[in-house]
Each structure stands twice: as structure tokens, then as C-alpha cells.
Image: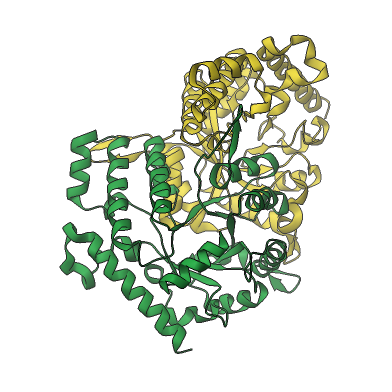
Chain colours: A yellow, B green
Amino acid sequence: MIQKLIANIRKTNAPIVVGLDPMMGFIPEHITKKAFDQCGETLEGAAEAVWQYNKEIVDAIYDLIPAVKPQIAMYEQFGIPGLMAFKKTVDYCKEKGLVVIGDVKRGDIGSTSAAYATAHLGKVKVGNQVLTPFGEDFATVNPYLGTDGIKPFIDVCKEEKKGLFILVKTSNPSSGEFQDRIVDGKPLYELVGEKVAEWADSCMGEDYSYIGAVVGATYPEMGKVLRKVMPKSFILVPGYGAQGGKAADLVHYFNEDGLGAIVNSSRGIIAAYKQEKYAAFGPENFAGASRQAVIDMIEDINGALQSR
Amino acid sequence: MIQKLIANIRKTNAPIVVGLDPMMGFIPEHITKKAFDQCGETLEGAAEAVWQYNKEIVDAIYDLIPAVKPQIAMYEQFGIPGLMAFKKTVDYCKEKGLVVIGDVKRGDIGSTSAAYATAHLGKVKVGNQVLTPFGEDFATVNPYLGTDGIKPFIDVCKEEKKGLFILVKTSNPSSGEFQDRIVDGKPLYELVGEKVAEWADSCMGEDYSYIGAVVGATYPEMGKVLRKVMPKSFILVPGYGAQGGKAADLVHYFNEDGLGAIVNSSRGIIAAYKQEKYAAFGPENFAGASRQAVIDMIEDINGALQSR
């Protein structure tokens, strides 16, 4: 799957990923109204609105981008119907040729981690049948529980040719509370980064490993260090745009070959029509605004990469 | 909800929680066969088997115990139908008067953590309706992302009178890889424990806070320290039985009042019929074996508490 991600990035010349993190407040009223007319003001109605909103955005942008990253929490909040919309979104994006990164941040131990890995990246045996529960291509995982928590995910990735992005340094203001604490003269995130590099070494595609890392755009100095600590890992970079990360800060997350990082934007793309810059599109053409925002983001990042 | 947990513990005189973590290999063949006959060898069939298995166990033990802890990964691996079985299990246990601890180990930042908190402990607004997505009473959460990740959960707990168990020191062999690293002369888990104590202080029920912690039974010396670091927090203790934790080791997880900890057993109870000790019950009476295993576990732990 790392090879498909790289191929998609080369084809689109766009080292970006769009976060499909639908909040009710982002969805234009005409979509919500139609969904509520059809299913009532129910979890099913909310899920239908989410799905129609996602579909229209994906239809408008899929040819420009290599990958999407649906954040499962935004679906889980609508219970079972919400998770059905998540699954529909995953399937639809895969049909469109996109790589799907399930932003699930799961993490547990032993058989429980194995069950999460099965759920999101693997297949489950039921009687004599082998079935696919959710079927994303990559998943984000939390390293706090150590190797026991990560290894079952790696096993499934090896079997299924899928991949991981392991949280190393997150983009939020308080990420330093634990992640930046100094251990043996180094911050904890660097120690986690070293572990990721170790895991990555045993999971190589061609030039890159299918074990990647999450490093927030909001900490560019740390990104620069972590790029060197994990030379073979793709870095998934949240925090561009809405959270304050700038393209010029992100060039050091990439390797010399122009690869090695994939920058995420969620609300900056999917709710672009709400920004003054794209207001002319109007809520009816929210997907057109998303397309323009994708074009602008690619130009912004590629511009920074070219002038480094 | 912490008051209900304490009331349930007092009523049953059983500081334990049963982990409803169904694996296909635990479920007796007669149940699986019936479910497959009805729904085929499908995710629906697996989910039906899980649900019937859970229901029979809960019916056999609900009067003896204060709480259950379904591990969502075990349901997520069966996709949407699996999650429907999770929801049915949560609802059924609540009907039976049990406190339900959703072992979901979620953790993210800002609006995403808020969405997870809504999903598992809160209510979601859809149009003019206010709906309950999953509706557990407590949830387990991962602290690696810091206060930004925890605060949205705490906000929902305050609003809904629910509670959390935050991972401090997990029961697995490699939990020390990051959790035990020394920061300013103290292990990281202690630092996390201090944060939990701080959060707990602002979330008091009567004598106990509704912000608790997870500390594995397999590290009794650390449990002793963490008990003092977090005096007002309930400690959820995994790792008893199958993972090697012994009752005598667990007495220091409790306060002098006999409260403050709740010891989990999963496969030791739900798959008791597979142990030599309970083999006489046979697969047909697997639930009877679970009931006897609950009685034995309560006696084991109360015995250790009385002789301390």
C-alpha cells in the first residue's frame, strides 16, 4: 500500500491528504434538510447528511489528490448509522482509486490490538468465510502501550500489505505535556521516533517503509529532527492551515527526493466555502470551493518545496 | 456515575468488573452453529453469536457483580454488525442495573476528542433532537496527547455525570518501554498519575472522583505508589488471572475504606468453562461456569482484602 500511496502522489504531484472529518456545522443546509426529510432528525438522518456531503466533495476532488483521511470519531458520534457512513465513505474512496488512511488512533495490547488491526486493516474469519470489517489502507495508532500494542498491527500490515502511521508528536498545544518530557537527555517523542524507525526497518516497501509516523505541522523544528530519526518512514502531517502550520515550515518534513511526507488538511478543504476567500462559491457549490482549496493547497506546498 | 459504581460495589460486596471481550474461539459451538444457521457465516452471523453468548453470561452473573467492561475492539473486528452487538450489550447490561465501562481507549485532540466523548458518554444534537450514540457509563482513554485530549472527555463527564479511566500504567510486558522512562527523576507513569490526580480533584463525586485510572495488576509495586499519587481516583485493574496478577498483590490498589479499586477479569470469567477447574460445567452450561468463576474471584479478592 505504501507503493500505491507513492504512485498516487507521483501521479497527482500532490503530497497532500484531505481529512474527511464532517461536523454537522460544516454541512450546508440544503443537504441536511434533504437528509432529515428522508430519514428524520435521527442518527440515520445525520449519517445520511454526512455521506451525501462526503460524496459530493470526493466527486469534486478525487482526481487531484492521492489519499483521504476520514477521522472515525466524527462518524462514531452518530453511533451505528454514523459508522455505516464511515464504511460507505471508505468503500467509495477506494473505488475512486484513493488511498484511505483510517484516522482511528487505536492502541491496546495483545489480542485486543490484533482485533483492532483486523477491524481496520485486516480480514476476519467467520466459520469458513474470510470477511473484511472496515478495510482501510492505513490506520493511525497510539504508541503509549509499547511494542505489545504495535506488533499485532504490524503483523496484519505484513499479511495484508497495509500500513500504519504511529503518533510521534501530535499537533495540539498540550502535546508537549508528556511527549516533550526529557528521557535520557532526549524528548520522549524522539524516543518514540527511534522505535518507529526500528519498526519501519523491518517493514520496507521499495524505498520507503509502510510504517510511518504522525508529526504535527505546528512543531517544524521537531519535524526537522524527526525526519532524520525516521529516514525511511512517511510522515503524516496534521495541523496545516486551520491549526496554524505553514507550507514553508513543512519542507523539512520531506526528504531530498521530494517524498516522505503527506500533509493533511481537513476543515480547510471540506469547509472551504465558509472561508471569506471561497465565499463566492456559496453553500450550493461547497464542493467547488473544496476543489479550489485543494488546488491552492497543492500550489502552496509545491511552491515551498520548489523554493527550498 | 461514580456514586452508582460505589453503590453497586457495596450492594454486591464485589470490587470486580467482568470484561465482556468475546473472541470467536471462546463461544461454544452450539451458539455459533445456531447463529450461522440463522444469519450465515457472515459478520451478522458472528455478531449474533457474540450477542447470544454475552446475553447468557450476563443473565447468569448480573446479580453478583457491579459492572461490566466490554472491550470494543472485539466487536469492531466484526464491522458494523459487531458494533451493533456492542451497543445491544451495553443497553442490556444497563437494563440489568450494571455500570458499563466502555473499554474504548480513545484519545485524540480538541473537537475530535469531543466527538469520541459524545459517541461513548454523551449525547449528540441532530436538528432539534438530542440523541444517544452508544451510551456507556465510563470510558477508558489514552493520555499520550495531553490535556487537550482529555479535557473534552472531562467536559462531557461533567455534563452527563459519567466517568473516565485514564491509562496510567498498563498491564502488558512492554508497557515500560515508554511508561517507565524516567522524567525529572520519576517514571512517566507517575507523571501521568499526577496529572490524573489533578484532573480528578476537579471532578469529585462524594468521596471519590469520577476521573479514575488504569493500572495493571501485573505491576503491584507501581500500583502501591500510584494508589498514593491518586488518592481520590478509582483504579481499574486489568491483568488479574490470565495475565498473571494475584489477589494478594492487589490489596494495595485499594484504600483503607475497602474502596478505590475495581479488578477486571475477562477470559477468566467468560471462557471459564474452558479451564480444567470448571470443565465439569461443559460447553452447554458455559454460563454456569462463568457464575462459579465470578463467585471464586470475589472470594479470592475479598479474602486477600480481609487478611491484609
**Is A48 situated above or below A207?**
above
Work out whether residue A98 can be spotted: no
Q: Residue at x 38, y 62 (%)?
A: B266
| Closer-to-camera residue (A27/B268) | A27
**Is A222 situated above or below B301?**
above
Residue A95 x, y percent position in the rendering: 47, 19
- Count of labels shown? 0
Horizontal placement of A282 versus B225: left or right?
Answer: right
Residue A126 x, y percent position in the rendering: 27, 40
Q: Residue at x 69, y 37 (%)?
A: A237
Residue B227 x, y percent position in the rendering: 61, 76
Q: Residue at x 62, y 38 (%)?
A: A234
Horizontal placement of A117 versus B268: left or right?
Answer: right
Residue A182 x, y percent position in the rendering: 75, 63
Horizontal placement of B36 versus B262: left or right?
Answer: left
Task: Point out the image quarter for the C terminus of chain A.
Answer: top right
| Closer-to-camera residue (B3/A6) | B3
Which residue extends farthest bottom? B307
**Is A257 situated above or below A228?**
above
Work out whether residue A37 can be spotted: yes
| Closer-to-camera residue (B14/A211) | B14
